[in-house]
Image (spheres, rainbow, N blue to C red):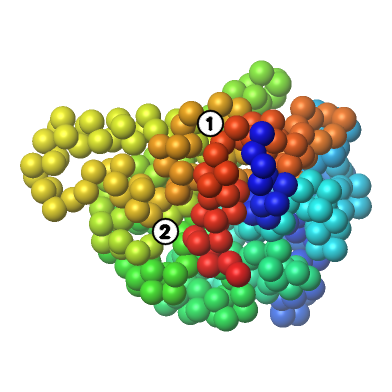
Amino acid sequence: MSSVLDSIPVVDVDSHILEPPDLWTSRLPKKWQEVGQAPQVIADPRDGALRWTVAGHMLVGEATHSAAGWDDWYPGRPPSIKEADPGSWNPKHRLERLDEYGVHSQVMFPNILGFYQYAFLDLEPDLRLACVKAYNDFQAEFCAESPKRLIPLANLPLWDLDEAVAELERCREIGHKGVNLGLNVDRLGFPRLRDKYWDPLLSRAQEMGMPINFHVGFNTNEEDINSYKAAGQERLDIAKHSALLLLGNVEQMSEVIMGGICERYPNLNFVSIESGFGYVPFLLESLDWQFKNMGAVQKFPHMLLPSEYFQRQVYATFWFEKHLTHLIHLYPDNVMFETDYPHGTSLSPGPASIAMNARDTIKANLGELPDDILRKVLHDNATRVYNLD
C-alpha cells in the first residue's frame, strides 16, 4: 500500500450538479416566464410525476440524475429534489460529502443542459442563449462556495460561434476552468469537430488554456433518448446499455486524433469524461497499427503517431476499474480520476449500490501504484490540465 496515499488531495474530474427546479424560471427575464417558455419542472399530466420540460419536450424527473444514496436500485431514483442527496444540489452539503468520501475537489458538469441539449435547440435563439448564460452563472455561484474545491466548466451556445467565443471569455472571467463541449456535435446537426466551422472556438480555447471536455451521453438527440428508453426496460438491458454508453468516447477520442484536430491545435487539451481507461491502450495500439498499415504514414509524413498525439494532449478518466495498475504506467501523464457523483453509476455508497466511496475505492484498486504515478493520476494531471491552484 502506498505510503503517500492519504496525503494526496484527490481531484475528481467528473461530478454533476442537480439543477434546482427554479434554475431558469428564477433567472430569465419575465417575458419568457410569463408565457411559460422558460425550462421548468411541471407535473406530468400522464402520471403526476415532477419532470423537466424544455421547449415542449417532457424530459426526465426532477431528481432523476441524483441516485446517490437512494434506497432502490437504478433506474429507481428520488421523485423530487427534496428527497435527493442534498450534496447533489447544495454546495455546503457537497463539501461535506467530499470530506466524507475523501475527495478534495471536483470538476462540475450539468445534467439537463448536457444530456438534453436537443431540447434547448428548439427554443428561439435569444431564449436558448439566455438559458446557457443563466446556467453558467448558476454554476459559478454554486462553485463560489469554495472556489478551490468546486470547479465550474463553461457551457457554450454552439449554434453561434461569435456568441460561443464571447461566452467562453466571459466564463473564464468568472472562474470557469474549461469547456464542456459534449460529444459528437454533429449528432445535433452541427459540422463535425474537424470542420473549419469550429476554428474560432478551438483557437480561442487554446489561447486561453481552456481544455475541451467530452462527456459520454451528452449531445444525444431525441431519437437516441427514445431508443434507449425503449430498449432499457429490463435490468439486463439497462446494464448493457449503460456499459455501452460508457464506451461512447471511443469515437470522439479517435476523431480528435485522426481528424487532424490535435495536429492543428497542438497546445489544446482534450479530456474524455466518464469513458474509462482500460480499453485506451488497445485503442491507441490499434490506431497506430492502422495508421501504418493503411499507408497513412506515407501520405501524411508530417503527422505524429496517434499514440503520440494522445500522450501530448488527450486525457482519459476512470472510477470503478479494478485492474489498471499494469496499464496506467503506459500513459501515467494522461489518466485522471473521477467519481461521477451523484449519478447511479457513481462511487456513492448506499443501500442500492455496490460502490465504495472514492477514498476506499482508491485504496482497494490503486494502492499498489508507485507513489509518483499515484500522485499524477489523483492530483497532478488534473491540476495541470485545468490550471488549478
Task: Reply above or below: 298 against 108.
Answer: above
Q: Count residues near mark 2 (Cα–Cα under 10 Å), then give few for <14, some for 14-19, many for 20+.
A: many
Q: Nearer the viewer, residue 345 or 26?
A: 345
SS category of the residue bearing label 1 = loop
User: Mark 2: which secondary structure?
Assistant: loop
219 horizontally vs 17: left or right: left
For the residue marked with disc 2, what is the amino acid?
Answer: Asn
Spatial CA distance of label 1 from label 2 is: 23 Å
Q: Is residue 84 above or below residue 77?
A: below
Residue with the mark numbered 1: 324
Give coordinates of residue 210: x percent, y percent.
Answer: 47, 67
Per the image, the residue denoted by label 2 is 269
Image quadrant holding the C terminus, namely bottom right
Quarter of the figure with residue 194: bottom left
Left/right placement of residue 133 relative to residue 271 reads right
Q: Could you tell me residue 157's position as x and y percent?
A: 51, 68
Circle 1 packing at 10 Å, graded few (<14), some (14-19), many (20+), is some
Q: Is residue 17 above or below residue 367?
A: below
Instruction: Looking at the picture, tell me which residue is in the foreground, 253 or 241.
Output: 253
First reached walking from the N terminus: tag 1 or tag 2? 2
Residue 280: quarter of image:
top left
Q: Is residue 211 visible?
A: yes
Residue 21, image x and y in percent?
Answer: 81, 60
Q: Which residue of the protein is positioned furthest toward the right in this rendering?
A: 82
Is any part of residue 222 visible from this angle?
Answer: no
Q: Residue at x 39, y 44 (%)?
A: 253
Comparing 58 with 151, the one in front is 151
Q: Nearer the observer, disc 1 or disc 2?
A: 1
- From the viewer's perspective, tell me whether residue 102 is left or right of residue 191: right
Residue 89: give x, y in percent of width and height.
80, 57
